Structures are given as structure tokens and as C-alpha cells.
Amino acid sequence: MVTRLPLPETCSLELADAILNERAKGRNADYFKNIYEEWRKRIEVYLADHGNPETVPRWPAINENSTPLLTLYKAPKQQNSQYPVLKSIRNGKLQFCPSCGEEGSPRTIDHYLPKEIYPHFCVTPANLTPMCDACQTAKGTKTLDKHGRRIFLHPYFDDFLTSQVVRLIVGRPFNAPEDFELVPIDDLEPAQAALVWRHIDGLNMQERYGAFFRDEYIRLLHLSQEARDQGLDIVDDIPVFLRLHRKKALNLWPYIFYTAVMADNELLDYLRKGDLPEHI
Ligand SMILES: [Zn+2]
């Protein structure tokens, strides 16, 4: 699930200035000179509005000729100012996708406001986050739902992502749970909870992670059987799993799984002394 990330170190406005300086003598000097004031203003609005597509206006005139801007992203030369910025976002040290929480190193860049619609933010660092391929495919060029509300959480600007924002409900019966339901955490404000719901749906999280939770649950049943065989209490071990995963990030799936287990007293009772399935 989404994790709050620090903004890239490079200031979005300073990078735009540096790019213009580089382009001032190039083939598209006039193009960049003509758009410069407006481009800068729009980056300021992006930063002030935290990239929110509900309020950041589109720029129809730029869509008529966006090739020179998109080339900054698609074919940067090593000596260009945006090159190291793109490289560091693409090859960062993250060990999970900040938008869905899947473990692994995300190697693609997502444009929070898609470059197809907002080409003027295609190299704006505040608009670029690392993302896994599955999230990229699910997100596509979506920004707003049919009611005009933004669909996705923003890893750089949604401050409440420093806390856990989703929880899991393990379905009943425990020997063959039917479903694992992801829901926003109870103490979020209603608008935040609604946004978390849209993010979960927008990235098909329920569908994508159902198998992960089933596997994790089966593993837990195995561990419960082992603990019983050795005369131990499985419930003593769960806080260790929690601490292990908490170190990485609060909104990663294993942490969400084990917080759900610890919060469910009926499930803990079942793991201690319920009838475990014969063939786990
Ligand atoms: Zn992802």
C-alpha cells in the first residue's frame, strides 16, 4: 500500500530554469523561450496544489505541440540537467513499490499527473515517483473518477501516509477463509478514507493481493501447527514478525497482514487451539 516518500532533492523550479538555460541555444530555443513563463507558473501551481488533478488546470495549448517537452523525458542526453534526476528516481534504493507496497525494486517512473495529458510535468521531479509495472498498467492515464475526485494517493504529498492507512479483515471460517478484505483504517478522516478506497480500486489491489494474503495465511497455519507440536504458543511469535516488517514500512503487505492477525482475538484463539485443516 502507499508509502510516504521524501520529495526528490532537486527543486522542480530550479530544474526548469536549468533546462531552459540549456535549451536557450538549441534547436528548440524559441519553443522553450515562448513557454517558459507559463511553464514555470504551472509548476508553481503544481507544487502549491500538491499535484492534485482536481485543481491543477490542464494546458490545452501545450498538448498541440508537446514533442520538445516530451523529448526531455524520453531521450535525455547524459549532459542534460534532468538526466541524473530521472536516473536517481528510476534506480533508487527503494525495496518496494511506493504505490502498492509490493516488495522488489521498482524500476519504472510514474508520472502522478500523466505525461500524455500533462506533458509540461514530464520532468518535474515532484510529479515523478518510482512505481512497479503492475501499478503502472493499472493506473494508465487515470486521474479523476466520474465525480471529478482524484483517484490516487500521492506518495510525496499525502502526509497521512506516514501512518498505516489500510487494514485487512480475515474472512470466516478460519479453517478455509473465503476472502481477505482490505479496508481503510478506522481513524482516517472521511475524505481520506474515501481517497484510500479509490486508490485501492484504482490499482486493483484487492484482486492483486488476494493470493498473497491467502499464501501468507496458509504459512501462518503451518507455523501454528509447528508451534503446537513443539508445545509453544504461536501468538508469542507474531509480534516478532510484526517488528521485522515494521522496520521496512507500515503500509507493506506483510505488516498489514500481521497487524490484522494480532487485532483479531477470535483468530488468535483459533490459531492456538482451533481445529486446523488436516491438509494445510
Ligand atoms: Zn506497485
Image (spheres, helix red, strand yellow):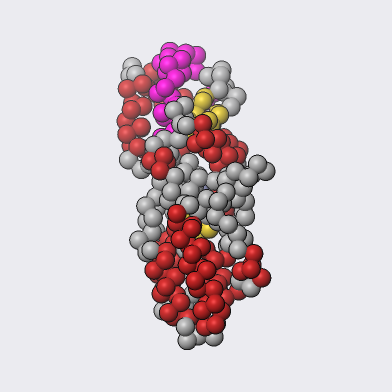
> What percent of the width, then of the height, locates residue 197?
56, 36
Q: Which of the 4 image quarters holds residue 141? A: bottom right
Residue 20 appears in the figure: yes
Q: Which residues are magenta?
A: 255-280
Residue 25 in magenta stretch: no
Please state the total of marks drawn on the protein image: 0
Please state if 36 lies on the left or on the right of 159 as rendered: right
7 shown above or below 225: below
Point 57% across, 76% down: residue: 68
Point 51% across, 79% down: residue: 33
139 shown above or below 243: below
Please state if 193 lies on the left or on the right of 15 as rendered: right
233 shown above or below 17: above
> What percent of the width, then of the height, locates residue 220?
44, 27
> What percent of the width, then of the height, locates residue 57?
58, 57
Q: Nearer the viewer, residue 96 or 18?
A: 18
**Magenta residues: mostly which secondary structure?**
helix
Please state if 227 lies on the left or on the right of 181 as rendered: left
Point 62% across, 54% down: residue: 140
Point 60% across, 24% down: residue: 178
Residue 216 appears in the figure: no
Q: Nearer the viewer, residue 90 or 175?
A: 90
> What percent of the width, then of the height, locates residue 103?
45, 46
Residue 267 in magenta stretch: yes
